[in-house]
Image (spheres, rainbow, N blue to C red):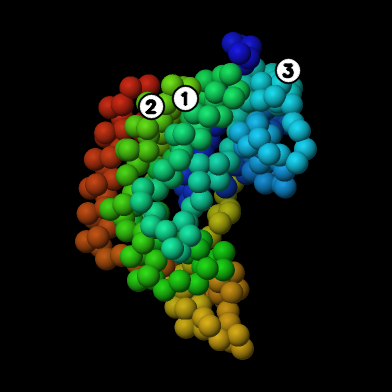
Amino acid sequence: MTDPALSVAFHIGVHKTATSHLQDALGTAQEAMRADGVSYLGPDAFRLPGRTIPVLFGLRTKAAVPHPPAVDRLIRMAAGGHRVVISEENFIGPLNPAKDARAKPRYPAAARRLNGLAEAMGQQVAVFVALRRPTTFINSAYCQSLLGGSIDPVASYLARNGPDEINWHAMIRDMVDAPNIGHITVWRYEDYASLFEPITQALVGTQAASHLMPSERRINRGLSSAAVAEVLHRRGDSTIDLPATVARQMLSVDHGYPAFDAFTPAEHAASEVAYTAQIEGIAALPDVTVLRP
């Protein structure tokens, strides 16, 4: 067991919930936070070969280079401080499943992976998670799929990724049931801007949070409807193929092109009703705090 005075907080995303924006703020302030006893490690620390979280903490036993036991690794990360804050959304699973697999449910291994990490650390881990209305989450996930080079027709993608298949309540409930996961703090992506201060205070503590400032820039801009249409129109023709990253610049939302949207207003409304019910169900779970404006 690690020092009881040491606490661990893990911001797990989910993807497409301003995760990069929060990570940018944490990374910018990490030196100042360290002086207040808070060590922050973000994606840059865990996305190098042989340095993923499973490898570093011994969750995969076939690592090419032996690493210290998980407890020792955690103590080193703390660097004499009282809190370690980790942010890495990829740990709970990929944003988009393989084309031959249905995303049902989303992030099915999240609770198991977090519980295993906490057990290896000998430390309960407090979890911080943002959620998003399923329809807009899927819109953003589809755009990210295109940006990653997977050119899939909208209808084909939606056939495997329907909004009804996203059950945030079930995901959080599984975390609550996991014995090594501590308190869970949840907020809606839609409330992120108004909740930046309470989110960061809960994540790193009041003193360390005083160093964090929200960036005014949009870090990961999505695709416009025109950009998506152009990418799909050119797919499969090597002479006129247009990467989504280029289409995003040519037909930018920032230049007035409407954002991509695969859903009707009625579908968004129905998704909002289901999403609200899931959030209320999550708020009723034990040892869970839902931050609200």
Depth order, front residue of 100/25: 100
Direction from residue 88 to residue 129 in the image, left or right? left
According to the picture, the residue beneath numbered tag 2 turns out to be: 176
According to the picture, the residue beneath numbered tag 3 turns out to be: 80
Depth order, front residue of 55/263: 55
Look at the picture and state if 192 lies above or below 71. below
Looking at this rendering, what residue extends furthest in the front direction?
A: 62
Residue 282: numbered disc: none
According to the picture, the residue beneath numbered tag 1 turns out to be: 181
Quadrant of the drawing holding the N terminus: top right
Q: Amino acid at mark 3?
A: Gly
Q: Amino acid at mark 2?
A: Val
Kindly report the distance in space between the C-alpha atoms of the residues bearing marks 3 and 1: 23 Å
Residue contact between numbered discs 3 and 1, judged by CB atoms under 8 Å: no
Q: Amino acid at mark 1?
A: Ile
Image coordinates of residue 48 in percent, x first then y, are: 72, 47
User: Residue at the spot x=28%, y=45% of the render?
Assistant: 275
